[in-house]
Image: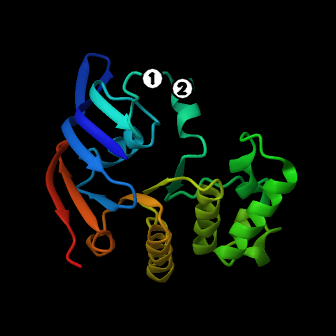
Amino acid sequence: MLNLKQVSKIHLTGDIQTTALDNIHLDINAGEYLAITGPSGCGKSTLLGLIGLLDVPTSGDYFFEGENVAGYSEAKLNQLRRGRIGFIFQSFNLIEELSVFENVELALEYTGMPSKERREKVAAMLEKLSITHRAKHRPSQLSGGQQQRVAIARALVANPALLLADEPTGNLDTAHGDEVMRLLRKINEEGTTVVMVTHSPAHAAQASRTINLLDGRIVVDALQAA
C-alpha cells in the first residue's frame, strides 16, 4: 500500500539545517496496524505527515498505492488524499461554532456527494460510534473522550483506506484513552489500515507492528507477538 525508499526530510531555518528523517525505508501493507514510537524530536510526527501526504520528502521516493508522490504540489497531494486518508489528532481540531453533526459532515463537503447522502452517512457514523445523542451539541459541551469520538467519526465518515492517528490519547485520561484504543483496534479489524504515533509502550503494544525512531532513523521494526 505504502512504500518509502531512502526518504529524508531536512528543515531549513535560516542557515540552520535540521535532519528530521534520515534515509527511511518503510513498507506498510493494506490492513496493517502500525505504531510509531520514539523520544520527542525523533521524527515521528514528520514521518506521519509524509505518510499522510501533508508534506513531501526532501529526497527519496514515496509510493502511495503505487504512485510516486515525491515532489507533488500541495494541490495534487490534497486531491490525492481526499477521501482516502483520515486524520486523528490529540487536540481533536473540532470547530466550536459547528454542532457534532456538522463537524463530521464537514469531511464530506468537498466530495460532491449529494446532501441527503451526506446526512445519511454522518448519521450512520454517529450511531456506529455511539454519539448520536450528542449530534446537536457543540464540542465544548462534550467530554474529552466524546470529542475524540467525534474526531474519529469525522476521520472515518468518508470511508478512507488509511487512518492516521497522532497521539490520539494524549489529551485524555486513562479510561477515555483506553476507550479510544479499543475503537482503533476495532476499526483496524474491520479492514482499515491504521498508523499511529504514540509515546505509550502499552498503546504501541496493541498494534500488530511497531517501529521505533531515533534521530530520524528506524532503529527497530518488529511484529508484535500474537
Residue 146 can be seen in this image: yes
For residue 190, side relative to residue 82 (left or right): left
* Rendered location of residue 190, percent (x, y): 50, 70
Q: Residue at x 59, y 71 (%)?
A: 144
Name the residue that disc number 2 marks: 76
Residues 178 and 123: in front is 123
Residue 77: horizontal and vertical position, in percent?
A: 51, 30
Q: For residue 3, what is the image quadrant?
A: top left
> Judging from the image, what secondary structure is the residue with disc 2 in?
helix
Q: Left or right: 162 with respect to 199?
A: right
Give the label on residue 72, or none: 1
Residue sticking out furthest to the bottom: 175
Q: Residue at coordinates 29% horizontally, 76% vertically from top-left?
A: 202
**Looking at the picture, how far across and down is residue 76, in whole percent?**
54, 26
Q: Amino acid at mark 2?
A: Lys
Q: Is residue 41 something that shows in the picture?
A: no
Q: Position of residue 69 (x, y in %)?
A: 40, 29
Front residue of this view, candidates 223 and 178: 223
